Image (cartoon, rainbow, N blue to C red):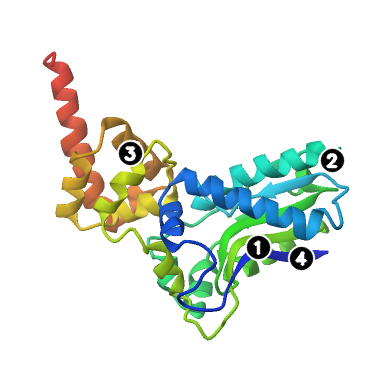
Amino acid sequence: MKATYSLHHINNSSVFGFNPDDYSRFKFGDDAVAKCFGTRLADGFIVRHLEKKPVEQQIVVISSPYSFIPTATFAMKTWFVYRLNRWLAENGYAVVQETKVHRTITYKEDYGELNAQERISLIGNDSFHIDKQFLEGKTLIFLDDIKITGSHERMIMKMVAEYGLQNDLYMLYFAELVNKSIHPNIENLLNYHQVKTIFDLEPIIKSGNFIINTRIVKYILNYNFECFCIFIENQDNSFVNLLYDMALGNGYHTIDAYAKNLNFITENLFVNNNNLIKHGN
């Protein structure tokens, strides 16, 4: 059994059913919005599916594939699981388990600005991996924030076929583009609805509700060097170290487009901090 559920259906390029500024902040690490989105998605899924036909098997929730740095969906997944677990426990069902879809390729292209063919060409070079044995006898929920062309879902289903998975599964999305006459780059309209420049990230990072993800790391590392330097020098040491460690974990130090900005961190901020410590300041 395969079923798809989307909380919001986008049929108009200016009416979304949710606040596009909220969505933009969510994509760049606002965990307060992730909590709202994840909780709403869980509530909608419970009403639409579980209250009508509860799942008897244990549920495994799987966020969108990532290598080292989680995607924005990972934060939404956490709150989705919290809300779903409360309903499951209250109704006498086993609570959720989680696992990960591993991916092998990282790329600097902005997925949201691509058309359908460009998306499948880009993501089609990737490969997804999952622990088949762990999933046996369980119902799978694959979670993502938005469905635009369905290329991500096709890659998931390709993986399902390659692994010979016989599980019941759900494909869940916070939102889905249902009007195919709207260009797929509407995703970038949403992604950057509030974040217009690198300096728009500061209120998110310093909000107390920040959780790092792939998008914000790539956006910062790919930004104009002069603005990047000003931005980085205004951040505290813990954020700079987090950004650097996440970049290394995803192998971004091997991507030429990110080299200049990463080198600025290592050659200036880290070296200067070490010199300050060395001289007792």
Left or right: 276 with respect to 20?
left
Dot 2: few (<14), some (14–19), or many (≥20) neighbours within 10 Å?
few
Left or right: 140 with respect to 237?
right
Label 2 with label 3: CB-CB less than 8 Å = no
Task: Of the two numbered discs 4 and 3 on the same chain, state the one appearing first in sequence.
Answer: 4
Q: Amino acid at mark 2?
A: Asn
Q: Position of residue 4 (x, y in %)?
A: 72, 66
Q: Amino acid at mark 4?
A: Ala
Label 1 with label 4: CB-CB less than 8 Å = no
Q: Which residue is mark 4?
A: 3
- Identified at 68% across, 66% down, the residue is 158
Q: Amino acid at mark 3?
A: Lys
Q: What is the CA distance from the residue labelled 1 to the residue labelled 3?
A: 35 Å
Q: Is residue 209 above or below residue 6?
A: above
Q: Which residue is mark 3?
A: 206
Q: Which residue is mark 1?
A: 156
Task: Of the two numbered discs 2 and 3 on the same chain, state the one appearing first in sequence.
Answer: 2
Q: Secondary structure at mark 3?
A: loop
Q: Position of residue 259 (x, y in %)?
A: 25, 51
Q: Is residue 214 above or below residue 85?
A: below
Location of the N terminus (image quadrant): bottom right
Where residue 91 is drawn, which disc sits there?
2
Between disc 4 and disc 2, the foreground one is 2
